[in-house]
Image (cartoon, rainbow, N blue to C red):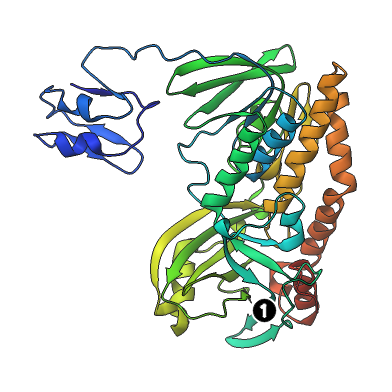
Amino acid sequence: MVTVDVRRCAYCGSCVSVCPVNALDLQETRLVVSEGCIECNLCLLACPMGALLPAGEQPKPSPALREQYDVVVIGAGPAGSVAAWEAAGQGLAVLLLEKRQEIGSPVRCAEGIAHQALADFITPDERWISAHVCKARITMVEDGQEQTWESEALPEGAASAGVGYILERRVFDRVLAEQAALAGARVLVKTAATGLLREGQKVVGVRAQGPWGERDIAARVVIGADGVESRAGMWAGLDTTLPSSDLMTCAQFLLTGVEVDPQCTYYYLDRQAVPGGYAWIFPKGEGRANVGLGIQADLATTSPVEALTRFVESRPFLARGSMVTLIVGGVPVGLPPSPLVTDGFMLVGDAARQVDPLTGGGIANGMAAGRLAARVAAKAIASDDVSRRALSQYEQEWARGIGRQMARNYRLRARFPPEQRVGERFLHLFAMTIGAGK
């Protein structure tokens, strides 16, 4: 029977199309070979990755990979790519690893960001911007009654956090990784970190597995940017476990054929339909919108997909639309673990729980953390001291800046338990947090 090298398989389906006995089945990200395989080997010729092997044959050796870097970054989301971009710009030898075969996919984000938060890193570009937004509408729902507040529209050139964008993350994330490559970083996709290399308690590299097989790669500093599902922090001995009260479990549809204000973001606070969280509608232009919600995990009485379906069906202007994309995932809304570093290792972005506890926004925070971590890593490498003590400058500077804002918002979130997140006081707080003012 033909076997599948899962490290190489890109799930393209070419092999399925040539199989004369229907022995191959592509199940999204898993290729299954049934016992009906007659070993005709036609699929081997059709596979562009060389991932199918005759019975009993072992994978072929792959091209050599450099095995020593100054910095290895795990994960090519905004936090990881900016870290690699900054580190390479500091003249360091950098490797950026992404476990998926396409950077930016699947999207697990509502894709909104304020203008200034974005412009601090990269000039906004229409290639990866779906919509320009300049106002917000917040609807509070209690006992079936709705109360809506809308901010005043702001001119696009205004110096205000209320002006922002809805991104195309599939393009935006790739552009950030391209910037890292242009700065000198090596980028590898479909290459997963499977563990950390240690010398005693010190992290000295990563074990990575990709189409070329499994390889140990040495590094002076490893930066973990592997998302909410992060394993890197755990491997490094950091406690990144989230209590369910600090996790928003989320679902989002990309709807087409809907009529919404193309310059307005919509928020719905409804403690019965969306306990502990909120629903959103973010316009994406041309009759499209991201429509989603996040529920505090310990309060969920139904799945977010079911809750979102009911939310859409209850509003005719949304129900008329068609769902063309389904996105699900988790958003950490707690505080970053302490410490965020250990000898030879740093944690950034969603992996470090650096997401705003009130809004769930994390793109800008992740990029800021990636840049800061890379600068501290470069300084530590230059002084030949990558100890926890040296790298802790990153954690200290984070705590004095965005970390302080996060801690404040976490306290405010605790001050307003879910049943109290309706009413004028919370509306004022929420509006200020999303940059709409009130």
Q: Which of these two is toward me, 158 or 384?
A: 158
Q: Is residue 38 above or below residue 359?
A: above
Lateral position of residue 256 relative to residue 158, left or right: left
Q: Is residue 340 visible?
A: no
Q: Nearer the viewer, residue 89 or 310?
A: 89
Q: Could you tell me how many numbered marks the image carries?
A: 1
Decide: is 94 above or below 25. Answer: above
Relative to 259, is 131 on the left or the right?
right
Q: Is residue 427 above or below residue 211?
A: below
Q: Is residue 224 visible?
A: yes
Residue at 48% in and 17% down = 214
For the C terminus, the quadrant is bottom right
Q: Position of residue 207 (x, y in %)?
A: 57, 19
The x, y position of residue 14, in whole percent, is 24, 37
Q: Quadrant of the N terminus?
A: top left
Q: Residues within 10 Å of mark 1 (few under 14, many from 20)?
A: many
Locate residue 95: give its quadrant.
top right
* Residue 155 location, quadrant: bottom right
Q: Secondary structure at mark 1?
A: strand
Relative to the observer, which residue lies in front, 100 or 187?
A: 187
Q: Quadrant of residue 143?
A: bottom right
Seen at 80% across and 75% down, the residue is 437
In this rendering, the answer to whether 172 lies above or below 434 is above
Give the residue pinned by disc 1: 138
Residue type marked 1: Ile
Q: Position of residue 374 (x, y in %)?
A: 76, 33
Q: At 78% across and 21% down in the image, what residue appears?
A: 343
Instruction: State the image coordinates of residue 195 (x, y, percent, origin top left).
Output: 58, 22
Please tell me which residue lies in front, 71 or 319. Answer: 71
